[in-house]
Amino acid sequence: MNALHRHQALDAVWRTPPGLRGVLVSVNHSDLGKRFMIAAFAYFAIGGVLAMMIRAQLSSPRSAFVGAEIFNQLFTMHGSLMMFMFAIPFFEGLALYMLPKMVGARDLAFPRLSAFGWWCYLFGGFILLTAMVLGLAPDGGWFMYTPLASRAFTPGINADVWLLGITFVEISAVCASVELTVSILKMRADGMRLSRMPIFAWYILVTALMMVVGFPPLILASTLLELERAFGWPFFDVAKGGHPLLWQHLFWLFGHPEVYIIFLPGAGVISMVLPVMARHPLIGYGWIVGSILVLGFFSFGLWVHHMFATGIPHLALAFFSAASTLVAVPTVVQIFAWLATLWAGRPVLRLPMLYIGGFFVVFLIGGLTGVMLAIVPFNWQVHDTAFVTAHLHYVLIGGFVFPMMAGIYYWLPRITGRVTNPSLGALAFCLVFAGFNVTFLVMHLTGLMGMPRRVFTYDSGLGWDIPNFISSLGSFVMAFGFAVALIDIALAVRFGRRAPRNPWKAETLEWAMPSPVPSYNFASLPTVTGRRPLEDDPGLAHRLAAGEGHLPTPRDGLRETLGVDMLTGRVTEIVILPGNSPLPIVTALAVGSFFLAMLFGLYWLTPVSVLAVVVLVWLWAAAIGARRDVGPLDTGGGAVVPPHHEAAEAPGWWGSVFTLVADASFFMSLIFGYAFLATVAPGWPPPRLFTPSIAPILLAVAALLLALAAGRHALRTVMAGRSAPAAWSAGLAAGATALALAGLLTAGWCGGLSAGSHAYDAVTWVLVAYAAVHLAVAGLMLAFVARRLVGGWGSALRSLEIRVALMWSAYAAFATVAVIVAVAGPGGSSWRWW
C-alpha cells in the first residue's frame, strides 16, 4: 500500500463527517481540542470586556457608570469566567489537541468521554452566559462565600446559577483529568518510557492528577450549598449546627491547588518552547520532573494560606505560613533550569520568546508578592485589599496567559498550517506587556494605601484617585493588545503563508506529521529511543508516512492505536477506540436537564433526568467490547499483542481506578466536613443523635459480604471458561447489592432524622445518600455484567468488564461500611433492634 492509499484508508476510518452531523457526533481529539481552545478564548474575551467595565467604574471616585448590583455581577462573572471557563478549559483543549501528537498516539484513551466533557463545558457556560444576559448573573463573588451566598442574603437564583453552572463545568474538568491521566500513562509510542516522555506530558500528567484530587472538594461544597439553598439543609447555618467556614475550607481545598493547576501547564509550555528558541536541549529534565511532583504534592497543604484572617490557631498559622514559603523552592528549580538552558544555548528572539521573556518578569513579581503574603502579619495588613488582586493577576496572567500566548504562536503552524505576521505579533506583545504592568503594578500601591477589593465606588481625597485612573488606562491598553493578537491570529489562519512541516526545527513527535494534520495523526505509529526522536532519527517522519511503524494498515475499519506498559513504554495491547457517536451530546443534555430542573425548582423532574442518564450510560457501555476471543495481533512494527479487551490492565481499567480516586476525594472531603462541624460548629453534638436500627444494618453488611463473594465467584468462573454459571453469580451479586441498599435506607429512615433541623442530621443524610448512590451504581454494573455474560461478551480472555464492576463493588462496600461507622458510631449507646 503506497502512502496515498494508506492516507485514504486511514482517513476513511478516522475522519469526522462534514456539516452539522460532524459537529454533533465527532469524538476526534483534534476537533475537540480546537473547540475547547476557541470557546475558552471567547470566554476570555467576554471576561476581558467585563474587566474593562469594572475598570471604567473604578477610574474615578463616585462613578455612576454602573450601580452596586451590576458591579457585583461584573466582578463575580469576571472571576468565574476567567478561572472556570477560560484557564482550565484552554489548557485542557491544548492538551487534548497536542498530547497524542507528542506521545505518538492516534487519539486519547476515551474519545467519547472527551466529547461528553466538551458538551458539559459548553452547556454549563451557556447557563452562566444566559443568566448574565437576563440580569440574573451570580453576584456574591466568585468565591461564593457563605453566609452571603445563603438563601437569606441572596434570595434569587443568582447564586444557584453559579453553583449549578460551575458544577456542570467541573464535571467536564474531572472527565478531562481522567482522560489525560490515562492517555499519558497508557497511550504512548513504543519505547517511550516515562523518562523519555516530552516534558509537557509530565506537566499535564501531574496537573491532571491534581485535578482528579482537587476538583471534587469544590463539587462537594457546591452540592452542600445548593442543598441548603433548595431544601434548607443547614450545613453553613450556625444557628442549626452548621458553620460558614466549612465552605471556605472546602473551596480552598480546591482553590489553592487550582493556582498550580493553572500554573503548571503554562510552565510546561515554557519547558517545551524555550529549549527550541534557545537551540539547546532542556537542562535539568530530571530536576524539573522532581520539582513538578513536589509542587503538586505541596499545593494540597496550602489551602489555609487564604484563611489567615479567619481565626485559625497560631500553631496552624505557623505551619501553613512555612508551607506557603517552601512552595517557592520547586518553582525556583524550574526557573533555574530554564535560565541554564538559555545560558547554554544560542537564543533567537522570535515571537514566542518575547512572551517567555514577559513571563519571567511578570511571574517573578507575582512570586515575590506571594512570598510576602505567606508572612502572616503582612497578610493581615493587606488581606482583602487591591494588593491581593494585583498579586493574583501577576501570578495567573504571568504564569498562564503569557506562556499560553507563547504556546499559541509556537504551535499555530502545527494547528493551522500557517504562520503569523511577526511585526503585528510583536506590537500585540508590547501593548499587552506594557498595559498589564501599568494596570497591576500600580494596584499594589493602591492596596497598600488601604483600598479594599470588590468595592464599586470610593470617595475622593483618599489618595486612590490617580492610581485607579492609571490602572484603568493600562487595562484598556492591555485589552487593545489582546485584540491586536486576535487579529494577527485570525489573519494568519485566513491569509497567512503556508508553514513548513517543522518551522522551528523542533525535535518532538508533534512535528513529524504532515501539514495540515490528518485525522489519524500518524500513518504508522513510531518507536522512540530517546527524548528527542526527530534528532535521533531525522528521517522518522518520512518512514512513518511510508508505513514503516506500527499499525500502518487499518484493520476491519477499526480505530486502532497502541497501549503500552506505564513504566517501560513496551507495547502491551492494541487499543480499539470507539468511532463517532451522538451518545456524548445526548448524555450531556440529560445531565443538563437535571441541573436545569434543580435551577428552576422542578425537583419532580430530577428522577426523570437521572433515569435518562442511567439508560444512556448503559447504552454507552453496551456499544463497546468484543463478543469473541481474538488473540494476539501483529502490529506490523515487530510486536504481537492482544486487543485491549483481552489485556490485563487496559485503559478502561485505569480509567475506573482514577475515577474512583476522584470519588474517594469527594468522600474524604465529606468526612472532613463532618469532622470539622463536629469539632468546631456550635451545638455539636446535637441533643438527639442518630439511633440506628441494628437489624437493617446487619442485613446490609451481610448482603455486602454475599455480593463480594458472589462477584469473586463470577470472576473465577469466567476465568475458567464457564460464562453461564458466571452470569448467575453476577446476577446474585447484583441482587445482594440491592438488598444491602434496602437495608441501608431502612436503617436511615428508622433513625428519624430531619435534615432541615440540624447540620448533624443533614450531613448524616448526605453520607447515607453517598453510600446509597454507590450501592445503586455497583448493583447496576453487576446487572450489566450478568446480562453481557449471558450474551457471550465475557470469557477467560475477556474479563475486563467484570473486573471493573468488582472494583466498583468493593469501593461501594468500603464506602457503605465507612458511612455506617461514621453516622452510627456516635449513637451506638442507643442502638435498637428495629
Image (cartoon, rainbow, N blue to C red):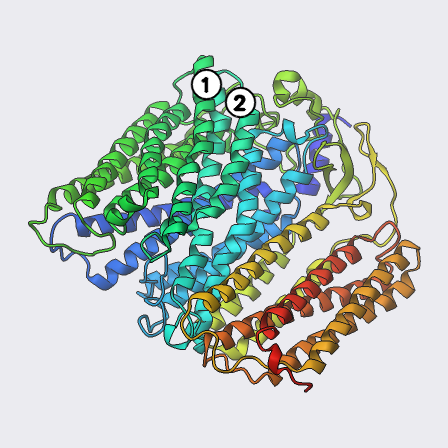
Left or right side of 345 for 99: right
Mark linked to residue 628: none
Amino acid marked by disc 2: Gly
Q: Quadrant of the N terminus?
A: top right
| x then y, percent, for residue 117 | 55, 53
- Residue 15 visible at all: no
Q: Which residue is mark 1?
A: 340
| x then y, percent, for residue 406 | 42, 30
- Neighbours of disc 1 within 10 Å: few (<14), some (14-19), many (20+): some
The answer to whether the residue labelled 2 contacts the one labelled 1, judged by CB atoms less than 8 Å apart, is yes
Q: Which residue is mark 2?
A: 284
Amino acid marked by disc 1: Ala
| Quarter occupied by residue 612 | bottom right
Q: Residue at x 49, y 21 (%)?
A: 275
Numbered disc total: 2
Front residue of 323/790: it is: 323
Say what secondary structure mark 2 lies in. loop
In the image, residue 165 sits, relative to residue 429, either above or below, namely below
Pick whichever of labels 2 and 1 is earlier in the sequence. Answer: 2
Q: CA distance from mark 2 to mark 1?
A: 9 Å
Say what secondary structure mark 1 lies in. helix
Left or right side of 594 for 40: left
Q: Residue at x 25, y 61 (%)?
A: 70
| x then y, percent, for residue 381 | 24, 48
Q: Quadrant of the C terminus?
A: bottom right
